[in-house]
Amino acid sequence: MASSSGTKDEVGPPRTMSRRMTRAPTLMVDQSDGSAPDSELVPSSLASIAPILRVANEIEKDNPRVAYLCRFHAFEKAHRMDPTSNGRGIRQFKTYLLHRLEREEEETKPILAKNDPREIQKYYQIFYEKNIREGQYTKKPEEMAKIYQIATVLYDVLRTVVPQSKIDEQTQRYAKDVEEKKEQYEHYNILPLYAVGVKPAIMELPEIKAALRAIRNVENLPVFQMPEGKERTVNDILEWLALRFGFQKGNVANQREHLILLLANMDVRNKNLQDYELLDNHTVQKLMDKIFKNYQSWCKYLHFTQNLECPWGDRRQQSQLLYIGLYLLIWGEASNIRFMPECICYIFHRMAHEMYGTVFGNVEHVIGGAYQTAAQGDESFLRDVVTPIYEVLRKEARRNKSGKASHSEWRNYDDLNEYFWTKRCLKLGWPLDRKADFFVHSDVIKPANKGNNQAVGKRKPKTNFVELRTFWHLFRSFDRMWIFFIMALQAMIIIAWHQRLTSNVLFDEDVVRSVLSIFITAAILNFLRAVLDIVLSFNAWRSLKFTQILRYLLKFAIAAFWLVVMPVTYSRSIQNPSGIMRFFNNLGADWQSQSLYNYCIAIYLIPNMLAALLFLFPFLRRSLERSNWRIINMLMWWSQPKLYVGRGMHEDMFSLLKYTLFWITLLISKLAFSYYVEIMPLIEPTQTIMNLTVSSYDWHEFFPNVTHNIAVVIAIWAPVVLVYFTDTQIWYAIFSTVIGGIYGAFSHLGEIRTLGMLRARFESVPSAFSKRLVPYSKEEAKQHQRDDTWERINIAKFSQMWNEFILSMRNEDLISHREKNLLLVPYSSSDVSVVQWPPFLLASKIPIALDMAKDFREKEDADFFKKIKNDDFMYFAIIECYETLRDLLLDLLLDDGDKKIIWQICEEVESSIQRRRFLRDFKMSGLPLLSDKLDKFLDLLMADYEDAQLYRSQIINMLQDIIEIIIQDVMNNGHEVLEKTHSLHHDEKREQKFERVKIDLLQSGSWMEKVVRLHLLLTVKESAINVPMNLEARRRITFFANSLFMIMPSAPKVRNMLSFSVLTPYYKEPVLYSTEELNKENEDGISTLFYLQKIYPDEWKNYLERITDPKHGSDNKDRSELDRQWVDPKHGSDNKDRSELDRQWVSYRGQTLARTVRGMMYYRETLELQCFLDFADDNAIFGGYRAIDINHRDYRILKEKAQALADMKFTYVVSCQVYGAQKKSSDAQDRSCYVNILNLMLKYPSLRVAYIDEREETIDGKTEKVYYSVLVKGGEKLDEEIYRIRLPGPPTEIGEGKPENQNHAIIFTRGEALQTIDMNQDNYFEEAFKMRNVLEELLKTHHGQRMPTILGLREHIFTGSVSSLAWFMSNQETSFVTIGQRILANPLRVRFHYGHPDIFDRIFHLTRGGMSKASKTINLSEDIFSGYNSTLRRGYVTHHEYIQVGKGRDVGMNQISLFEAKVANGNGEQTLSRDVYRLGRQFDFYRMLSFYFTTVGFYFSSMVTVLTVYVFLYGRVYMVLSGLEKRILDDPSIHQSKVLEEALATQSFFQLGLLLVLPMVMEIGLERGFRSAIGDFIVMQLQLASVFFTFQLGTKAHYYGRTLLHGGSKYRATGRGFVVFHAKFGDNYRMYSRSHFVKGLELFMLLIVYEVYGHSYRSSSLYFFITFSMWFLVASWLFAPFVFNPSGFEWQKTVDDWTDWKRWMGNRGGIGISPDKSWESWWNEEQEHLKYTNLRGRVLEIALSIRFFIYQYGIVYQLKISHGSKNILVYGLSWFVMATVLLVLKMVSMGRRKFGTDFQLMFRILKALLFLGFVSVMTVLFVVCGLVVSDIFAAILAFMPTGWALILIAQACRPCLKGIGIWDSVRELSRAYEAIMGLVIFTPIVVLSWFPFVSEFQTRLLFNQAFSRGLQISMILAGKKDKPSST
């Protein structure tokens, strides 16, 4: 019986305790599924008992009784910690534990002794002796760490069971020893720094030792006094810093390892390893320069003295390391403040000053007191420095109201960071003054009645910039572009206007004078810019310096001055002015000079001239902008705002020339096109229209006296002007395609794109491999250039890598066993005199040679051999076959006489060749017979056998047959050879020849490898030419081979390469698909597994072959063994059943974390292989990587060294934000994620998982939530915690989720580079091999001293084969990540960071705010902001295409639309951001153009394209309904002109989405050939790609526009599954109603009105083309979601969809009812953006709604009932009709509500009266008033839009209408409208569903790509599933 004898009140048995507790009815832990042991489910407030339960589980098998005692101790401890069980989940957990203890009390009995105290002591002693005393010299550090942990816990338990007096001496001695040594054996990350005994190889590396020695140098550092008066000794400088400033232990341990690895990796590069003891001072200096570059720049900017003083001499290195250590410790604990780099600079600045004072003598403080050397508490830095700043962030984030509040109402990360860009930050003081302005916050909360808590008090101003929601940001940020385009347009119109009057237009004085009026426009636009600068930054004025405000005001004053002066002086230069010109002329009457205007222009242009001059000398501009000299700052004050970032971003001269030339050529083309195609044709008709007089209208004209038909001119010109502003985007697409293609060709892209090309160039692949991927110094290369062994070693190295690559594809099931054998290269070619190429190159060479020999009729050897040598591969194959066959036979034979015969035959062959008598001495006709016999012989050798004796006799028979054929049928003098050998051996005993064979040779792997290879060479026919068959395998092989011929840096040795980390943020996406998900069937009976079997039939076949073939079950030591050990902690490694393997196979084809981790772990595998190739001797290399004997000491050391170097160079951290919560969750999905992530850690020991741990801890008697960043790794069966760092609060509450997730984990990454990888990415073995080459790019200087800060890599989209949509998306994305980014990086120099897999210069970015920005909403597209940030902070971004990473994309229509919506939202937010403003203003003109058209400009152009259609149609509808168009076109002077339409033709291209296709075609052409590209293009058009792209244009336009108007951006989870399900009509309607359907129906109505009432363009075919593009747009927007919906036109599905939609429309909404359940809830959610928009947004919404009134106004005058009256009363009467209809509807709905239940009769009578009234009114109208049937249709066309306009206006005025009480009526009217819209869209679907062939056609269209791979999708979608095929 257990008891706690150490306590005063002895605790009785558990049963007595249970009486005092209230039992919970359920147990929290149900372990029936074995998902996790109880130790992992401990409630967070009892976290300290988890280790005790882990130990109990660990020793359970060994001693169940001691395990029981441990659990009992855990229970007691839990009860002490929370006696009342108030904490979350504690009562259930205690109850569970109590039940278990009760059961175990009965079941377990002491084994080693009679009672519990003796039992546990005895067990403890045995445990110590067996594991610690003996194990410390034999066990690895991680094993020892675990043992010490168990020993510590056991002793704690022992002390509660055994009274102190009864613990025997030996136990106490053991416990003391454990206590003293346990710190040496803690769980470690990469470096076991304190390990004793068996030291891992990594700790023996000289660079690690040198770095460790340097940071352990603590001489001369002041000693700390502990509170108890003792002096505290320290081990290293980080420990000293922790004591001085109070950093956390976890942070110190983490940064200690970080610093050691940084120093070691930097120091070892290019260093002699012979006498390597000390760390190089140069290394420390270099690291210091890199880490403090931003800090030094900040100090210079603010004119602060840098606190980085280092004395010269012995202490210099120590003090430098102290500064570096201090910075890293601050950064490591800064949590969310890491996004504020200058805030960290400030903290460091203050602390470095204090540290210097402490270290170098007891220096007097500023205040006068001496520095203290008392040690600080463990969390004092967190408490006193980080938490106060974090609280400010948190309060500001709360003002954001989850993204609903306007950006101008709260300060984001940038605002708070920019506070530290001014000297005001000194007011914070040190220690931080909590009363300082920065911390004082208006966060008083009203005792709100409505529950809407709002902060009151005076709001803090924004800093430097205000993100106001307005389109004007586009003008403000890119003002130079708009001014240029507007001035160019004005000039072109003026020139074109005069062109008709005079031929020599450019030299005409009047024309020149008129053109000069563009400077008046410039003055107006500059004035607008000055006004916008003031208005848009007004909210930040309180934070601006006086000089900045003065600059704004002066700019405004000067702009106003020019605004007056320019028109005045211009009017003076005009003869006989009239109108407004006379007014200006009189103003300037005193100035007599006529050319005054010209002088003004000259003065006005002076700043532009200066800017142009500086533009030509970018280095001068750069140094001026970057200068911190006050005199230069004063000079530059006018031209640029005083900001810390964005200064001196100018490129070098050569780059400048390249992109300037690009844009000048483009602009000339664009302006010429605009002039001749858009403007010129419109001038003549415009002049004619302006001269026409129109006297009568078709409606009541409010302004009949407007001169020059100005409304018509506007209607005609408006769309043309819009096209003028957007067609630059089309020109950009054309130019970027051409230039990108040329650059790609020069980069050697696509030189090897087919297997034929690969075979043709394969001979040069090994040498290219050696040149690019094998590290050699130049001396080595020169020395060995003519050395034969050198070449053989190179080929051997290539073969190691090539074979690993082929095996990796085999393990991924891309190739079969046969294909694998055909692709492998023998490791060692030492036995054969020629190079042994892979068999797929030598396929059919031997059969062809045999045929040639057989048919060769001439007798001359020379001709025959010449014919053979013409084909190198044939020659190699023949020699190899001959020599291999000879060696095989000689190895097989035991008898020397037999061997002699073989030798004799060989001599005969060789001598006859030398004597040129081969054809005479040998009969070629016998060769085919010999070949057949050899084939059978080799088959026999490869076959399995049971009876050895029988098998031996078969071999002997076959061998004798072969020799007989050679002697008799092939050789002319065969018998002579036999006789010659007989004569030599005549004295021997006569017996049969060839009877003694060595059968045990068949067990030798290397010998059998030769047999297999020889068999392949002899038998493989033409089919091997197509090896591999799998398209993905082909793509990978050809891309890899091609990349070897591309330009890349040469590879360093692994030891000298840059170290790097990979970081993947993960939330709750799939890790590994479960068996249920695999087999779960959709409504058509299709499971994911079945679907994938059909899409990847060859891969499924290869998979089955891999898991069922016993021979190939595991390739020697190949990775498939690893792949089969997906360990489940419950079952250990035995659970390799089929379903597990199926799960993996499917998961590796989806977008899962398991796939990503597998891919990234290839980095580690390639590093180990590269180490082997770097360090192994020649014998080992010839022997082969897989053949080395690990038991051999040298090779074991080599293997360990390779693993150590891989650890040192590569770290992979997955940031699983909620892993801790998933571990404890009761949700099955979460538990599954936890188990799968744990399995990944167990499978890949070097994988690290970081997560945010939320715990409840009791602080000052209160339970509080405490947050930690935790890093774990895989242990033996569970995860082991490495570091735990406390956070100031929940980190993800402040900013966007993904960047915050990355930020908390970034402290656990290592190395000088960091690759950011999303969890929908993949990697490939052969690409990972090139990583060290890519990393060298970070060391290359570009144009002067600039090194890259971001390396862009290309991606391969691997989801393209799922469906036609996925294929479109994959092609679009591929063209963006290749040709698109290629041109952005060079020549345009505006590549940023577009999501992953870019590689960051880690130190550059971690000192400048991290890898992304995280402010809520504004940084929605967090990735691109890191590119902006890098560029603004003088970074350099490049793009490299010789390496690629896999990436998954969305594959279903709705997923793709969500993704496009997210990106469009993100671009909308970018438009408002300070980063875009600063880049737009600070880039030079041409780089700014590149920036605009490749980021926000693309989305703005998309929006304007859609707007153009609206403007065009509304303009035409105005002209048609007013009658103006008819009257103008009837005019004889304009009757024949078609130019009105011609100008609009250009925009149709944009609209059809052809823009996106150009780069796509070019890239496919480059990489796969232009025939393929054109074929793909045609197939895409047949699969309706244009419909898809046109539809997505609508998505972009809608979400971009809405974001700029109202906000409402949010992260949209797009889902990453396989889309094999049918989306219901209701789902599609909800998703696209506002973005596409409403707009599509509006355009449809406009086209109908225009068609019906316009009778003008029947003659113009060109016009038909334009309206065709609009009809196409309408059709795409209305029906694309249904066309691309699986089973969209299947009758049964259509019926179900209708039922579902009706139910949804009828359901009432309410609190808690989700939008997909009720129309009302959805309708309310759709107006969410209007709830939070500002007044400007509401007014704009109302203004835009007014357009719908034009229908009613125009059409009522066209009705026959109006009898041609133009009186305004007609329109008034139409409103009366409208009001009557609405009133009647209201009465019906009120009647239904009032009388519908109780007075049913009354209600019926009411309806009857209304019906009779309606009939009588209609009768009167028909009979008396002349109403006709067509009028009724016209009336519907007129009144429907009016009703919709009223609804839109009502929604914008919702608060007012709710007050009046008519909101319910608005809702019911809306419901009616929605029902009608749904019906209109649904009808065509119903009609098409009647025809079965439509559904079949649609299926073929959707899944065509899969069809070409043998997918019988029609069978699938019909659910006729062949069940057995999935087994």
Image: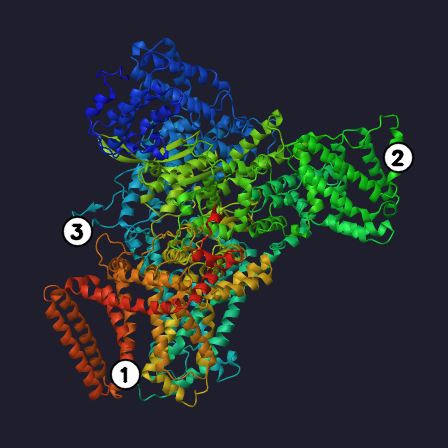
Label 2, on which residue? Answer: 979
Amino acid marked by disc 2: Glu
Label 3, on which residue? Answer: 450
Q: Nearer the viewer, residue 313 or 692?
A: 692
The quadrant where residue 513 appears: bottom left
1532 versus 571 height, above or below: below
C-alpha distance separating marks 3 and 1 = 54 Å
Residue 1173 % position (x, y): 62, 36
Amino acid marked by disc 1: Val
Quick check: marks 2 and 3 in contact, CB under 8 Å?
A: no
C-alpha distance separating marks 2 and 3 = 115 Å
Mark nearer the viewer, 2 or 1: 2
**Mark 3 residue crowding within 10 angstroms, few (<14) / some (14–19) / many (20+):** few
Mark nearer the N terminus (3 vs 1): 3
Mark nearer the viewer, 2 or 3: 2
Q: Report helix, strand or loop for mark 1.
A: helix
Mark yes or no: residue 515 visible.
no
Tell me, for residue 1829, which label it has, or none.
1
Mark yes or no: residue 407 visible.
yes
Mark nearer the viewer, 3 or 1: 1
836 versus 1286 height, above or below: below
Q: Which of 413 and 745 is in front in this view?
A: 745
Left or right: residue 546 compared with residue 780: left
Q: Report helix, strand or loop for mark 3.
A: loop
Left or right: residue 1859 compared with residue 556: left
